[in-house]
């Protein structure tokens, strides 16, 4: 049995490579790329290694080649900091080029993407940034809105359609242990009534412990997750809460 | 050797008038120093080391002044690991200068540390002092600024105090590089090192003068009489029905405190110091006001007050961790008590040396043994101390994070060619075997990446500009940030504890997170109630009368020294032989062998007899492995009796665990201990005596160890330090005003990324080296495995924990039970165990 993929509900798949696959419309969604993470930190004086950066785009391309989607949606925090640096421009161009060759790339703006439009322009990339994208009964967004009211309305609307609010922003993770020696902090999906929280795609995300229940976004607060699906050794593992 | 003629030097004349005869240390040192020799002076505290080192310097400066030749530049730099030592020294040097020259002596002394204000620093630059008292970090800050090169070029003497406390860690490696930079390009820099009694002194001397220098060594250790004895509250009936040893310990300690004017009590941990202070005050309320606590996590002001009160003779006892081990002036201490063994002979001598009013009085130290293993260990320590068998000091080898920091520092003042920089670095003894490829790799890292990467991007945000010839440090923000982050001491997540507005000390974040508002814990031995917590601070109120939790600090515990381990093993072997050959009057035999008195001997003997009955006494000629199969427990425990100290057992345990996992699948938990290690497995992983040698073969041991360390907490801990020291992330990063929730990354993330993509990154290499060389003793494990190849193994299957395994077993349980006070847990278990033993097979009466 292929445990690297799991059909959460008909047509909605989770992939252990930290992606969501909407089968009917052929949409692949990932969250929180935080491109340029190391560069942003280096500009602050933290001499982080840049070896992992190419990895993000490469992993995404491999996913795209596997699924052959029509559209690829980034659920926000495309970049870590929209800085005016040639290195970041290069990364973004690389992303736009490689994804763009294969599918339509759509960007949702996250809290880290405030200046992203300007950076894209400076890099010569013609891409729109959306606040939210509706696909079938679902809505895809970042999840960083402040006001519970708007969130509530969205939950109600898409709940009525039997759809979900699919968001990123939380970088959810869950610590699994065998009670003896080993403990591992695993990125995970969080599933709640009408809500799906997607783990961060970026290798740099440390992950926030889901069991603490401290959510940044109003969505998981309004619709608390009932269970988590952890990613361990390339496989998906449903974990009861 | 006669002292220099008094008429010519007012300084020596002053000394002769004030103190009379010089101490042996002074007598031996002065002529050598007068001849310009580099000198390592090893002697206990209170033997006049300060004047041994400084009088010649003061004298020379005074003569210069008399001849009108005294220039306003820095001529002597004094470096110590603790600021407090510098404060004390300043006072001690001012005294002769003021008595000789009056209120404003022409020879000026200044302190320079993190505490020095901006205006003081400015003054020190415009009018440099003749003598600068500073720390390794502050010295490096000066060396990193071009404007200080001129004032430092005139330095003639450099004095390093408590050099033994620096040589064996990375702070010392850092200092060694600074010394070479200080000495660079000048004719003569006279180096003087002041050390406690450690071995081997030639290593420490090398550390002081570098690979190219000569150094005389003076070992005046015997100058001070140190008397050590072992005391234990375990009497004839060690564990009576009522009462816990913990309480009896406190009562005994109180008794000792009452009998002496001032007592200094050393505990091995900060928690221990807190708990002991608290319990002493509870048990002896009339002494509560004159018993204080002292450790590194208390605020400096709090500590200073304790030190001052101690000096003024206002306190009857101070309970400390290792904070008062070094030579801060604490006045006259009559007795030193060490709660449980100090884990090494050098430490025992160092601590005991803090007692005694002056060089002529005897320093008395008492080792208070809290359980039977402790008792044997303490006796062994005392025996070895009497015959001066010291522990070995080991220097770190080419720590790459320290190197990274210094290269940036060097690059601040000049453009360095690779060849020149490498040559200088290799002159520092800890770096004498630095490989060229490591040097190049560190430069690449600091430049922002390898050459191809740097060509790829116009801006890689490196710290240095690097080309084939050499390097220099980038200007502007890089330098400013760097100057704020010089040093080796890592920043652990600390929360400052405040009583109203007064800061008391700090506790670890992980401890505070476990508490709820209203919970009571202790600081400085006093119960306080948690009222409010923010990210970096916790506010408390006094909670006298409430029962507090002892805070835990995550400091690594000292492992047992090899010498003491060997001594204990020798004793066990001899006792086993004595038993087997039917030696009569075993109590007297033990008493004589350990020099411990008949009461102690009785307890020790009974324990070992019980061990002999239940299992066997583990000795050096066979490895004893005990399998504990308790039907009530889900798993099996194996006790490996490798008496090689916790650091070596840590390595050994990991090797065995890795192999067992491969052999049987699944996981295993190993708990290392000084006397061996415990392996906890599931029943299906049970193994036989025949299978043990395969777990212990020397071939492939390093691979197994490496595997086991890959995701270990210890490696991550060392990586965290390396990342800070090696300037990958700034220490202050963790103090930024981001909420913990938002701080969604940490050095753990960097570690994981590097583990996957760049496992050979210079800072990963440094983390592995540090892990293998500091808290894990790989060499010790190797030595054991090599010796074990020619020794038999014996597996004994037991249903009850035998006495000599008990310490290991209890450690394991102690680590799991965080809530209960460890003292309490130990006592409860000991009590249970003893009553089982007492009613079990009767040990043969001598």
Image (tube, coloured by chain):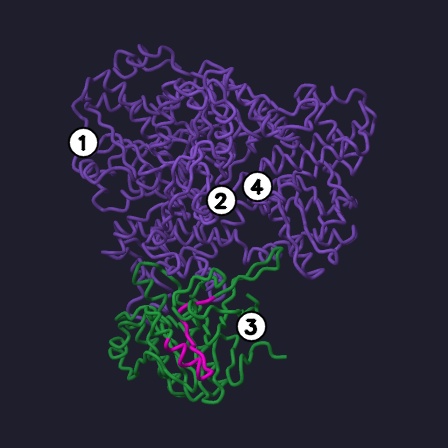
Residue A116 appears anywhere in the view: yes
Q: Categorize mark 3 by other alpha carbons within 10 Å: few (<14), some (14-19), many (20+).
A: some
In the rendered image, residue A50, in percent from the top left (x then y), is placed at 39, 67
Q: Which residue is mark 2?
A: B554
Q: Determine the secondary structure under disc 2.
A: loop
Q: Which residue is mark 3?
A: A234
Q: Earlier in the sequence, mark 4 or mark 1?
A: 1
Distance of label 2 from label 4 (alpha carbons): 17 Å
Q: Nearer the viewer, residue B166 or A45?
A: A45
Label 4 with label 1: CB-CB less than 8 Å: no
What colour denotes chain B? purple
Residue B295 appears anywhere in the view: no
Q: Which chain is green?
A: A
Distance of label 1 from label 2 (alpha carbons): 46 Å
Q: Nearer the viewer, residue A217 or B77?
A: A217
Q: Are marks 2 and 3 on the same chain?
A: no
User: Which quarter shows the N terminus of chain B?
Assistant: top left
Q: Which residue is mark 1?
A: B72
What is the span of residues highlighted in magenta in the rendered image?
Answer: A153-172
Residue depth check, mark 1 versus mark 3: number of the one nearer the observer:
3
């Amino acid at each position: 049995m292929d445990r690297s993929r799991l059909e959460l509900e008909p047509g909605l798949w989770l992939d252990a490579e930290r992606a969501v696959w909407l089968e009917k419309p052929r949409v692949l969604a990932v969250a929180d790329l935080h491109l340029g993470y190391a560069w942003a930190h280096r500009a602050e004086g933290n001499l982080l290694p840049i070896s992992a950066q190419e990895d993000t785009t490469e992993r995404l391309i491999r996913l795209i080649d596997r699924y052959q989607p029509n559209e690829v949606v980034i659920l926000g925090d495309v970049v870590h900091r929209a800085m005016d640096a040639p290195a970041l421009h290069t990364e973004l161009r690389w992303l736009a080029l490689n994804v763009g060759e294969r599918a339509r790339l759509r960007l949702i703006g996250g809290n880290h993407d405030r200046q992203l439009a300007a950076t894209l322009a400076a890099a010569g990339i013609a891409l729109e940034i959306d606040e939210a994208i509706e696909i079938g009964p679902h809505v895809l967004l970042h999840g960083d809105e402040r006001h519970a009211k708007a969130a509530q309305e969205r939950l109600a609307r898409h709940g009525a359609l039997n759809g979900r609010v699919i968001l990123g922003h939380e970088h959810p993770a869950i610590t699994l242990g065998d009670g003896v020696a080993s403990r591992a902090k695993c990125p995970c999906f969080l599933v709640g009534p009408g809500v799906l929280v997607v783990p961060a795609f970026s290798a740099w995300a440390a992950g926030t412990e889901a069991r603490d229940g401290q959510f940044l976004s109003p969505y998981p607060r309004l619709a608390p997750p009932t269970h988590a699906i952890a990613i361990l050794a390339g496989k998906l593992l449903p974990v009861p809460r | 050797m006669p002292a220099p003629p008094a008429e010519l030097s007012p300084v020596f004349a002053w000394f002769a008038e004030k103190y009379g005869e010089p101490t042996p240390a002074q007598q031996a040192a002065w002529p050598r120093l007068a001849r310009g020799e580099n000198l390592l002076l090893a002697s206990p505290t209170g033997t006049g080391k300060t004047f041994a080192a400084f009088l010649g310097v003061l004298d020379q400066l005074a003569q210069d002044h008399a001849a009108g030749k005294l220039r306003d530049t820095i001529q002597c730099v004094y470096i110590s690991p603790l600021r407090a030592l510098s404060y004390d020294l300043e006072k001690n040097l001012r005294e002769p200068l003021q008595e000789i020259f009056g209120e404003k002596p022409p020879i000026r002394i200044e302190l320079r540390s993190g505490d020095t204000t901006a205006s003081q620093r400015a003054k020190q630059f415009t009018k440099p002092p003749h003598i600068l008292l500073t720390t390794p970090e502050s010295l490096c800050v000066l060396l990193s600024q071009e404007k200080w090169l001129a004032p430092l070029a005139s330095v003639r003497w450099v004095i390093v105090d408590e050099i033994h406390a620096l040589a064996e860690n990375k702070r010392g490696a850092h200092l060694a590089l600074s010394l070479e930079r200080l000495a660079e390009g000048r004719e003569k820099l006279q180096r003087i090192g002041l050390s406690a009694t450690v071995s081997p002194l030639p290593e420490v001397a090398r550390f002081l003068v570098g690979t190219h220098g000569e150094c005389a060594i003076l070992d005046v250790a015997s100058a001070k009489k140190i008397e050590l004895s072992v005391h234990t509250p375990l009497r004839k009936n060690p564990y009576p029905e009522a009462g816990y040893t913990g309480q009896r310990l406190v009562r005994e300690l109180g008794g000792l405190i009452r009998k002496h004017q001032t007592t200094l009590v050393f505990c091995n941990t900060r928690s221990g110091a807190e708990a002991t202070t608290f319990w002493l005050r509870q048990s002896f309320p009339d002494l509560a006001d004159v018993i204080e606590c002292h450790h590194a996590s208390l605020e400096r002001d709090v500590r200073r007050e304790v030190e001052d009160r101690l000096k003024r003779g206002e306190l009857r006892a101070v309970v400390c961790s290792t904070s008062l081990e070094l030579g801060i002036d604490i006045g006259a201490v009559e007795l030193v008590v060490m709660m449980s063994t100090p884990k090494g002979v050098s430490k025992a001598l160092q601590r005991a040396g803090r007692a005694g009013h002056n060089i002529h009085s005897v320093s008395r130290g008492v080792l208070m043994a809290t359980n039977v293993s402790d008792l044997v260990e303490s006796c062994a320590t005392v025996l070895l101390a009497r015959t001066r068998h010291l522990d070995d000091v080991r220097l770190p080898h080419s720590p790459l994070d320290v190197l990274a920091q210094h290269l940036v520092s060097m690059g601040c003042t000049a453009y360095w060619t690779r060849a020149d920089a490498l040559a200088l670095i290799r002159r520092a003894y800890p770096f004498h075997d630095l490989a060229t490829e490591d040097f190049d790799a560190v430069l690449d890292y600091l430049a922002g990446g390898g050459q191809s990467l740097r060509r790829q991007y116009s801006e890689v945000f490196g710290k240095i500009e690097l080309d084939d010839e050499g390097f220099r440090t980038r200007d502007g923000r890089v330098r400013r940030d760097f100057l704020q982050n010089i040093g080796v001491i890592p920043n652990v997540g600390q929360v400052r504890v405040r009583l109203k507005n007064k800061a008391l000390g700090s506790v670890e974040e992980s401890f505070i997170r476990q508490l709820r508002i209203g919970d009571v814990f202790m600081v400085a031995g006093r119960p306080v109630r948690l009222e409010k917590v923010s990210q970096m601070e916790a506010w408390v109120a006094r909670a006298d009368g409430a029962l507090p939790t002892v805070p835990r600090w995550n400091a690594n515990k000292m492992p047992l020294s090899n010498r003491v381990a060997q001594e204990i093993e020798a004793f066990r072997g001899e006792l086993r032989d004595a038993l087997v050959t039917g030696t009569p009057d075993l109590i007297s035999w033990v008493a004589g062998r350990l020099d411990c008195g008949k009461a102690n001997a009785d307890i020790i003997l009974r324990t070992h007899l019980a061990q002999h009955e239940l299992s066997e006494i583990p000795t050096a000629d066979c490895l004893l492995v005990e399998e504990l199969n308790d039907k009530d427990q889900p798993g099996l425990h194996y006790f490996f009796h490798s008496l090689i100290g916790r650091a070596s057992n840590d390595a050994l345990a990991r090797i065995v665990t890795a192999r067992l996992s491969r052999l049987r699948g699944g996981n295993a938990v190993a708990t290392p201990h000084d006397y061996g290690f415990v392996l906890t497995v599931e029943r299906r992983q049970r193994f036989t005596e025949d299978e043990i040698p395969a777990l212990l073969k020397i071939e492939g041991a390093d691979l197994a160890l490496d595997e086991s360390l890959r995701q270990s907490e210890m490696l991550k801990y060392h990586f965290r330090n390396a990342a800070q020291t090696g300037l990958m992330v700034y220490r202050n990063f963790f103090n930024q005003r981001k909420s913990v929730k938002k701080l969604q990354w940490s050095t753990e993330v960097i570690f994981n990324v590097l583990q996957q993509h760049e496992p050979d990154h210079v800072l990963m290499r440094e983390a592995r080296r540090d892990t293998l060389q500091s808290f894990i003793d790989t060499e010790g494990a190797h030595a054991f495995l090599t010796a074990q190849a020619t020794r038999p193994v014996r597996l004994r299957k037991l249903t009850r924990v035998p006495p000599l395994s008990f310490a290991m077993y209890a450690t394991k349980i102690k680590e799991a039970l965080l809530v209960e006070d460890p003292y309490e847990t130990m006592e409860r278990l000991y009590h249970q165990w003893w009553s089982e033993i007492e009613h079990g097979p009767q040990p043969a009466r001598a």
